[in-house]
Structure formats: C-alpha cells, structure tokens
Image: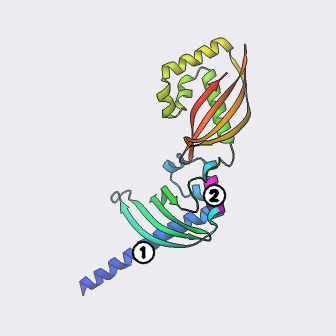
Amino acid sequence: MHQFRLAIFAILLTAMASAVQADVQEDFFKAVQSGKAKELTQQMRPELLVEIDVPVLTAWMNAINDRLGPFKSIQQTGTTSEGGLTNPIKTSEATIQFERGTASSTLKTMGGKLIGFNVTSNELGDDWFKGPTETKLYEELGQTFIKRFLGGQTDEAYAMCHPALQQAIDAEAFAQMSQQIRENAGALKSTTFTDSHMDISDDGQYLLLNYNINCAEATGTCEIKIQFVGMKGHLLGYDFE
C-alpha cells in the first residue's frame, strides 16, 4: 500500500514538473509572438542579457513570426534538473507547432529565469539574420571606441575589442598606433557618424560603420567593423584613414 502511494506521488510530481516546464515554454513563445523584445528580456537572468543585443534579438523574433507564424501548441519532450539543491538548472525540451511549421525548443532556467535558449526549425533556416533592427547601439559603440582610441584611453579602447582582434594586435602595438595617429593629427575635436551597411558572406555577418573625424591638425575617416556571433555584435576591426 505504501509503495503504491509512493508510486502515485512520484507520478504526480513528474506530471507537475512537466506542467511547470510547459508553462516556461508557453511564456517564452508568447513573448516571442508579441514581437516586443522587452517581453522576452524580462524573462532572462543578467548573465544571459549581457550576451544578447536587443536589435539582434528583435530581428530573430521577427524572423520567427514572419516565417513560422503564431505558435499553436507545445508538446513537452523532456525535462531535466541538475546543479544540486541551491541553484538547480532546469532544462525544458519541447516541440512547438506553429501555423507554418514546427520547431525544437530547449530552454534552460535557474531561479525561474532563462540562462539559455536554443530554437531550431527547418522553416526558420540559418539565413534569418539580415542585420539588426536598428544600429544606434553600434553607432554609439563606434563613437566611444574612436574617442577612447584618439583620446589616449588606449586600455579602455583595447578592452572593447573582441578577443580575436586582440590576438591580431597586442596591447602595446595598439597603444603605439594610437600614439602615432595622435602625434600626426593632433587632439580629437569631433567625430560624426555618416552611414552603415551590412556585409553578409560565407565567413560571417558584419556591420560596417563609417565616421568622419576632425582633429586639431588633420581630418580623416574611420570604418568600424562589427561581427555578429550568436545574438551579439562584437568589435572586430577598425580602419583609420
């Protein structure tokens, strides 16, 4: 009798856990369907938020909605929990039925907040990213980099560079380049953003931003290269002329 009750209790706990994880999936895709990035970012923990740029997340949400349409149903396919008693990481796996296709969804949560997600779908494909929905974030990043680089704040400017760029030029050579430009051009007076365009090729997805630079003794231009990896743009290159 006790064994039977324990078995029923275990079944109930499993069913409750599956229902909770299904709610996580439903909340996630309701937010996606809203088209509002804030609805989704408020479900995320800080450590996930720092890995995501809102203009890229919004582009992804738009692609889901445009290519797959509204979601119709959720079939839970797996739930796991790991990490002990204090900060368990829960993984929810599900098949999502949309109006125009299906997707496999894996959501990882800790403390009820997302720490990771992966959604794959043949209908979505791997060519959904055509560029961020707006570029102001990257325009300002480029402005900050130029001001630091030409203002002698080379440590701060270098820290903004992606590790791949730091491997191509070490901190000492970076600082020397900054000093040489400042000696030739004089103090920075102003920078003006002029235009940007996407460059999508087999080797990556890039946003190229152009600036006019006005220094005390010379004028010139700078092109900033942003590469998108995952859902974040990284400063991967610069070209002063």
Where in the figure is residue 64, as x and y percent of width and height? 61, 60
Determine which of the numbered discs, if any, sits on residue 211 in the image. none
Q: Main secondary structure of the magenta part?
A: helix
Report which quarter residue 201 is drawn in.
top right
The residue furthest front is: 202
Where in the figure is residue 103, as x and y percent of width and height? 53, 65
Where in the figure is residue 227, as x and y percent of width and height? 57, 39
Magenta stretch encompasses residue 7? no
Q: Earlier in the sequence, mark 1 or mark 2?
A: 1
Q: Mark 1 packing: few (<14 Cα in 10 Å), some, or many (20+)?
A: few
- The magenta region covers 59-66
Left or right: residue 98 compared with residue 90: right
* Residue ID at (49%, 57%): 117
Q: Relative to residue 195, is residue 96 depicted above or below?
A: below
Q: Mark 2 packing: few (<14 Cα in 10 Å), some, or many (20+)?
A: some
Magenta stretch encompasses residue 60? yes
Where in the figure is residue 241, as x and y percent of width and height? 67, 21
Which of 140 and 204 lies nearest the eye of the viewer? 204
Determine which of the numbered discs, if any, sits on residue 16 in the image. 1
Which of 127 and 27 lies nearest the eye of the viewer? 127
Q: Quickly name the residue at label 2.
A: 63
Instruction: Indicate the amino acid at tag 2.
Output: Ala
Which of 46 and 203 lies nearest the eye of the viewer? 203
- Label 2 secondary element: helix
- Label 1 secondary element: helix
